Image: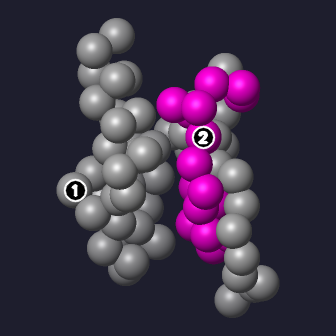
Amino acid sequence: MGPSGATIEHFNNDGPFNEKYNVAICCRRCNSSKGAKSLSDWFETPYCSEEKINEETVAKPVKEYLRLKKLY
């Protein structure tokens, strides 16, 4: 396991990078695990399964991003 700490996660790696709906504080392990994957692809990884991370268990900013994404 690598170093821990807070990082900035961009939900959509293609941007926009300066919109608050596209960013959140995230632990380094989760951010590294997600990498360039979309959130839906990331939720399907063994990491998320082992850590019990899914659309229902994520923090409020992630849920809000997912809700907005479904509207567009």
Circle 1 or circle 2, nearest the eye: 2
The residue beneath circle 2 is: 23
Q: Is residue 63 left or right of residue 6?
A: left
Mark 1 burial class by Cα count in 10 Å: few <14, some 14-19, many 20+? few
Residue range highlighted in magenta = 17-34
- Tell me the residue at 71%/28% (across/down): 17
Residue 44 visible: no
Q: Residue 23: within the magenta?
A: yes
59 w.r.t. 24: above or below: below
- Give the image location of residue 66, x and y in percent: 34, 34
- Tell me the residue at 77%/84% (across/down): 3
Furthest-top residue in this view: 72
Gap between marks 1 and 2 measured at Cα: 18 Å
Q: Amino acid at mark 1?
A: Glu
- Give the image location of residue 59, x and y in percent: 38, 57
Q: Which mark is residue 56?
A: 1
Mark 2 burial class by Cα count in 10 Å: few <14, some 14-19, many 20+? many
